[in-house]
Amino acid sequence: MNAIYILWLRELKRYTRSKAQVIASLGQPLLYLLVLGFGLGPVFQRAGNGSYLQFVAPGVVGMSVLFTSVFSGIGLLWDRQFGFLKETLVAPVPRLTVMIGKTLGGATVATIQGVLVLIICLIAGFRPVSWATLPVAFVFMILTAIVFSGLGMAIGSMLQDMQGFQLIMNFLVMPIFFLSGALFPLSGLPSVLSFVTRLDPLSYGIDGLRNVLIGTSEFEPAISLVVLCAVAVLFLALGSYSFSRIQL
Amino acid sequence: MIKVENLSKTFGEVAAVDNISFDVESGEVFAFLGPNGAGKTTTIKILTTLLRPTSGTISIDGLNPATQPNEVRKRFGIVFQDPSLDQELTAYENMELHGILYHVPRKIRHERTEMLLKLFELWDRRKNYVKEFSGGMKRRLEIARGFLHTPKILFLDEPTLGLDPQSRNQLWTHVKNLNKTEGVTVFLTTHYMDEAERVADRLAIIDHGRIVAQGSPQELREQTNTDSLEGAFLALTGSSIRDEKAGSADQLRQIAKMWRR
């Protein structure tokens, strides 16, 4: 238990100490929010879908949770590069403990990042339908963060060096983002696209957020919750399996 | 304390460690001497549960690292060949993290951290980030950390690589002292002969994955009719440079590794 705590704390300390990185990682969501939010706003409005800023804000929150949590898992590569990974692998704690500590740390950081982006959205003019249900939004953020931290850990354990990073970025993380409905509504899509978006776990995270924050959604929130929980368990299992197989 | 019988480790076709046997007595300083690529690090990795052996039996304090890794891990401390500190944390935080991972009770953790950091002259810098440390300071911190959980065995894999003579000298003085005061068994690898001669009670010379000789520095000198350990080493392993050979063996190992994945 203490081991989980100290590894969790380590992730948090590393995050809060790299202030430049925190600010840098807010840049991308800000760009999406402002440029797309205001740039596509008029078109979206004319199509009769209301304010695009309102629509895209939950998507941008989901995006930053996705990126932050996947990268925190891939941070394992840095631990490998700088040698710290060895220190945790020879310690007399089960690998599962190490993996859980790191994953929870990554998920916490990602959730904080999501909250920061949500605050930025509020400053930019986003207004949730109800302030009372805001805590439910945290539930969706946390679950999304756990899902993708688990995935990040699995990837981080399998990659040997940074060369695979671009591959993962372009063929896994970006597709997860673009196919999630973060930027466009999931209704009325061509059937192939519609099918693919339903395979994307992030769709359920963002849809759940949207339900809580702006009151419209494609799926039943309960279904989104169940899907996220199931995928979280699956990815955590995958993550701990691949983490347990690391040899140096 | 450490008992190794007929240990082998092969990567694909290449035998990194080839049927070696040795014993390390409790409380002694035992050195593994060998040229680059001789199999020193592989042996340490196997002893410290990071690699599984291909064949052979190992017992560490009566336990088998392959079947009881966690019990074995509690009993040793290790200083790796390359750094394994968290650079983004302070020296004290690195110690704290280690102590918690090794289940050292809070009070003892704080006392020993203070004692060790003072001994290795890092106490005044305990609140500094490790990334601001010099190479020698990082090494000292790693060794201090290795002693934190009062291990029965301390593994040191080329601990003085890249250090100046002053730091090396001071480091061995501390390690020797702790070896005496805490009774910790020390298993080290090095290719500095003077160090091996100075600190080791007994040593084994390893080359191409095989142990070619073992005994006290005195015995090895007599065995080879040479007047220094360096002479003994060259007499046993030949004087040709084998970086190139080790290089291609390393390459083969890499290839083998790639195909196994």
Image (spheres, coloured by chain):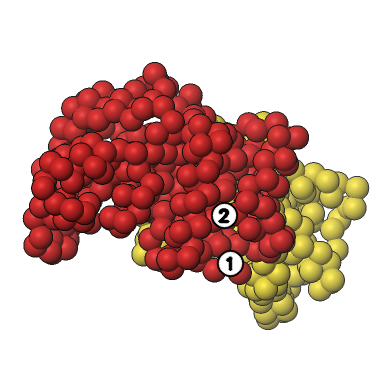
- A14 vs B176, left or right, is right
Q: Quadrant of residue B104?
A: top right
| Residue B69 drawn above or below residue A35 | above
**How busy is the neighbourhood of tag 1: few (under 14 within 10 Å), some, or many (20 plus)?**
some
Q: How many marks?
A: 2
What amino acid does circle 1 point to? Answer: Phe
Which x, y percent locates residue B118? Answer: 67, 52
Chain A visual colour: yellow
- A69 vs A26, left or right, is left
Kindly indicate whether the residue at mark 2 contacts the one at mark 1 (C-beta within 8 angstroms): yes
For the point 8% across and 55% down, the residue is B238
- Camera sees residue A114: no
Residue B133 is tagged as: 1
What amino acid does circle 2 point to? Answer: Leu
Which x, y percent locates residue A12? Answer: 69, 53
For the residues beneath circles 1 and 2, the answer to whether they share a chain is yes
- B151 vs A207, left or right, is left
Chain B visual colour: red
Q: Quadrant of residue B239?
A: bottom left
**First of labels 1, 2 by sequence position:** 1
| Residue A173 drawn above or below residue A157 | below
| Residue B51 drawn above or below residue B255 | above
For the point 84% across and 50% down, the residue is A134
Residue B141 is tagged as: 2
| Residue A199 drawn above or below residue B170 | above
Which x, y percent locates residue A218? Answer: 66, 49
- Camera sees residue B26: yes
User: Could you tell me which chain the residue with mark 2 belongs to?
Assistant: B
For the point 22% across and 25% down, the residue is B5
Q: Report how far apart the C-alphas of labels 1 and 2 lie in the structure.
A: 10 Å
From the image, which quarter does the C terminus of chain B lie in? top left
Towards the viewer: B174 or B14: B174
